[in-house]
Image (spheres, rainbow, N blue to C red):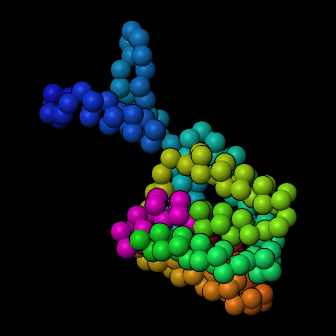
Amino acid sequence: MRARCQVSVGTFNEALKISQNRGVVALRPGPGGGVFAAAQSPLVRLGNLFLALDDSETTVLEAVRMRNALDPLLVEDALISSSAADIASMREQLAVMESAVVRSDATAFTRANWHLHARIAGTSPNSILRTVYLGLLDVIEAHTLSVEPPTVQPVAEYIEYRQDLHVRIVDSIEAGDRELALRLIEEHNTERDSDQTL
């Protein structure tokens, strides 16, 4: 395979490691070992995207459900506790998300989205709530191999919509508009035709 691809041993080994980390191939050592196509990763619908997961589908679904239930509490805390520096930090993460939108990179967008939620959670003075929420985000991210685009809706269109929604959430937090912020987080977590949301 290395000769066919005309690459160095180091480059080939790095490509194998990346492929293994993404769940594309399985590497088996010893007699009868080698490079094998990996079993299909379980997919979990997240909004109009799909997460390709390791073998922890149930764990991720439970973590997303709990995270969504805690979002309104964290938005309430963010409305009260966010400083100008916190808002600036959220806007920096929105810029990372926007960059992913421009590239139509659903995986980068989703990970940046989770980091935005972590920054919002970081404003909470409730250490138990903050710790639990950040732990849930870690579980979701740790078990996600990649984000797969939908087959029916263009990925660029969907993540652009989600980007705009997150901008409006941060705007409402900055404005201290509780009613709007809670309405937006409800839209965020109950998007029509979605099992789970980003």
Q: Position of residue 53 (x, y in %)?
A: 55, 46
Residue 21 seen in the figure? yes
Picture quadrant of residue 30: top left
Q: Position of residue 46 (x, y in %)?
A: 59, 62
Could you tell me how many numbered marks the image carries?
0
- Most foreground residue, 174 or 196: 174
Q: Quadrant of the N terminus?
A: top left
Magenta: main secondary structure: helix
Boundaries of the magenta span: 100-113
Q: Position of residue 97 (x, y in %)?
A: 49, 70
Is 172 above or below relative to 35?
Answer: below
Is 46 above or below relative to 21?
Answer: below
123 lies left or right of 167: right
* Residue 102 magenta: yes
Residue extending furthest top? 31
Q: Residue drawn 69% across and 90% down?
A: 175
Q: Residue drawn 57% across and 81% down?
A: 167
40 lies left or right of 4: right
Q: Residue drawn 74% across and 69% down?
A: 123
Residue 25 seen in the figure? no
- Most foreground residue, 44 or 160: 160
- Most foreground residue, 14 or 43: 14
45 lies left or right of 70: left
Q: Residue drawn 27% across and 30% down?
A: 10
* Residue 132 magenta: no
Q: Position of residue 29 (x, y in %)?
A: 42, 16
166 lies left or right of 30: right
Q: Quadrant of the C terminus?
A: bottom right
Is 142 above or below relative to 84?
Answer: above
